[in-house]
Image (cartoon, grey):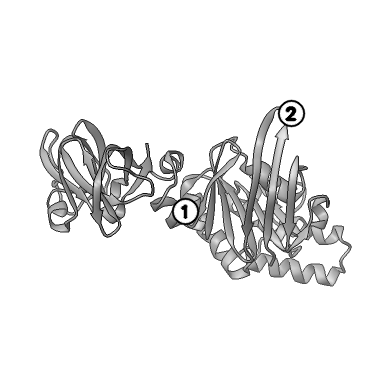
Amino acid sequence: MSTVELVSLSKSYGQTLALAPTSLKVEEGEFFALLGPSGCGKSTTLRMIAGFVRPSGGEVLIGGSDVTRQPPERRGSGIVFQNYAIFPHMNVYDNIAFGLRMRKRPAEEIDRRVRAALDQVGLSGFERRFQREMSGGEQQRVALARVLITEPRILLLDEPLSALDKKLREEMKYWIKELQRQLRITTIYVTHDQGEALTMSDRIAVMNGGRVIQVGTPRDIYERPVDRFVTEFIGESNILDARVGGEAGDGMCLLAIGPFAATAPRRAGMSTGRAVALVVRPERVLVGVDAEHAGGNLLRARVQSHTYQGSFIRYRLDLAGQTIVAEAPNRTEGAALDDGTEITIGWRPEGTSILPD
C-alpha cells in the first residue's frame, strides 16, 4: 500500500485549462473517488497519476516519493480503463499472465500467481475462455486480475463500469468495493456516476471545470454540500429561496420561506435579512401525518402532481409559489394524496443545509 499525494498539480493544453493547481492526499488503503461531469478534469488527473500525461506544473508523490518525471512502468501503479483492453486473440489465462511474462518471471511462478488471481476475482475455471465468450462483467474481472497479478502499490480505475448495463453495474460496484476492502490496496476511482461514488468510496473529490470543489466522505458531500453545484450534482435536492430572520439558538437560525417560518443549521456570515438557499432532500420532506408526528418545521403546501414509484410515492408540491419534491413511503394501497389537496409538510431542521445566495 502507498499514499498518493498531489502537490499543486496542474495541466493546460494551450489556453485550455484541464486542471487548476490541485493539492490533495489519498491515504494508504483508501478508496478515493474523483467525481464530476464530462470534461471536468478527473480522467486527466488520473492519467497524470499513472504517468500517461505530463503535468504542466506541480508534483505527484506515491509513497512519499516524487514520481512526476518517472515513466508509468516505474510508478508501481495498475490501471483499468473503461474498455478493459483485453487482448481478443488471447484466452483468459494468457491475458492475465501477460504482465508477468513481459517481466520474464519463471513459468512456475506465473502459473501459481495466475491461478491465485483467478480465484481472487472469482474466475477459476475460465482459463481457456476468450473475450467473445464472456460477459462484460467477466471481462472486467479479467482486466482487474491482469492488473492485480503485478502487485501494484496503487490501483487506478477509469470509469470501469460505464460500459455495463444497469443491473450489472449495481452488482459490480459492490464486488469491486469488497475486493478492494479485502486487498487493502490504495484505489483511485474516476466516475461521473454519483451513486457509484457514494456507494464505493471512503472519500470523494467533487470536480467541475478543472477544479476540485469539495473533498469529503460520502455523508459529508451529500448532507453538507459547499455550494449549489455540489448540491445539484450529488443526488436530487430541493433548493428553496429563503431569507434569514435571526438567531434560533442551539446553532440554528430562523428562515422565512414566503409566509412560513422554519429553522435550519446556522452558517457563518449570515446576517438578518440576507437571501439564502435552503437545501432539503426529497426523502427528508415529510408529508401529512408523518410531518405532524415528527416535529420540526411545519408548513402548508398543495399537491401539484404525484407519481407511483413502488416503494414510495413522489409528490410535486407548491410551497408558497415554489415547487418542492417529496418522496413519501408507500405504506398502504391507494394512500396517495389527490392532486390539488392542501396538506401539511415538514422536515427536521438538522436534515437541511443552507447555501449562500
**Can residue 83 be seen from the camera position used here?**
no
How busy is the neighbourhood of tag 2: few (under 14 within 10 Å), some, or many (20 plus)? Answer: few
| Residue type beneath disc 2 | Gly
| Residue type beneath disc 1 | Leu
Q: Secondary structure at mark 2?
A: loop
Q: Would you place residue 304 above or below residue 194 in this image?
A: above
Q: Which residue is mark 2?
A: 14
Q: Which residue is mark 1?
A: 198
**Can residue 212 be seen from the camera position used here?**
yes
Q: Would you place residue 177 above or below residue 267 in this image?
A: below
Which quadrant would the C terminus be assigned to in this image? top left
Where does residue 145 sit, x and y in percent of width and height? 68, 60
Q: Would you place residue 84 above or below residue 242 in this image?
A: below
Left or right placement of residue 157 versus residue 281 in this view: right
Left or right placement of residue 25 versus residue 72 in this view: left
- The foreground one among 38 and 18 is 18
Left or right placement of residue 158 versus residue 280 in this view: right
Left or right placement of residue 33 versus residue 317 in this view: right
Where does residue 351 sit, x and y in percent of width and height? 30, 54
What distance separates the C-alpha of mark 2 from that of mark 1? Answer: 34 Å
Q: What residue is shown at x 27% (from left), y 44% (from top)?
A: 309
Residue that lies at the very extreme toward the top in this rendered image: 15
Q: What residue is shown at x 70% (from left), y 27% (from top)?
A: 15
- Mark number displayed over residue 352: none
